[in-house]
Amino acid sequence: MLKILSWNIWHNGNLEQANDFLKNANANIIGLQEAMRKDGKIQLTDKLFKELGYRYVYAPAFQVE
């Protein structure tokens, strides 16, 4: 069974809650909207990608200063 999750996490939203939810979602594919970059990394923890084995592609719609 393939589980796909799509979620608008809101720019400057509660990222700790987002990380916790995504860790427990058990989705095969995750599509996030309004995930922003900070210091060259998206605002979700590296732990999420390393522990769960996700890879990501980031494509900004526009840059917010």
Image (cartoon, rainbow, N blue to C red):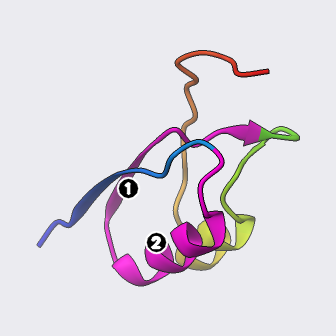
Quadrant location, the C terminus: top right
Query: In the image shown, does 12 or 43 lie closer to the viewer?
Result: 12
The residue sitting at 88% across, 41% down in the picture is 39
| Neighbours of disc 1 within 10 Å: few (<14), some (14-19), many (20+) | some
- Answer whether residue 17 is magenta in the image: yes
* Disc 1 from disc 2: Cα separation: 8 Å
- Where is residue 49 drawn, in percent x and y? 61, 65
Please indicate whether residue 15 sits to the left or right of residue 54 in the image: right
Residue 38 occupies quadrant:
top right
Q: Quadrant of residue 28?
A: bottom left
User: Could you say which disc has been placed on residue 22 in the image?
Assistant: 2
Q: Quadrant of residue 21?
A: bottom left
Q: Secondary structure at mark 2?
A: helix
View extreme (left): residue: 1
Residue for point 58% across, 23% down: 60
Q: Is residue 14 above or below residue 58?
A: below
Q: Total of numbered circles in the picture?
A: 2
With respect to residue 46, does 24 lie above or below?
Answer: below
Q: Which residue is mark 1?
A: 30
Residue at screen point 61% across, 63% down: 14
Position of 9 relative to 34 (above/below): below
* The magenta segment: 12-37
Horizontal and vertical percent position of residue 2? 16, 66
Specify the amino acid type for callout 1.
Ile
Q: Residue at horizontal 64%, vertical 72%?
A: 16
Is there a contact, CB below 8 Å, between mark 1 and mark 2?
Answer: yes
What mark, if any, has residue 57 been given in the picture? none
Asked whether 43 or 51 is in front, the reply is 43
Label 2 packing within 10 angstroms: few (<14), some (14-19), many (20+):
some
Q: Amino acid at mark 2?
A: Leu
Q: Earlier in the sequence, mark 1 or mark 2?
A: 2
- Left or right of 62? Residue 32 is left
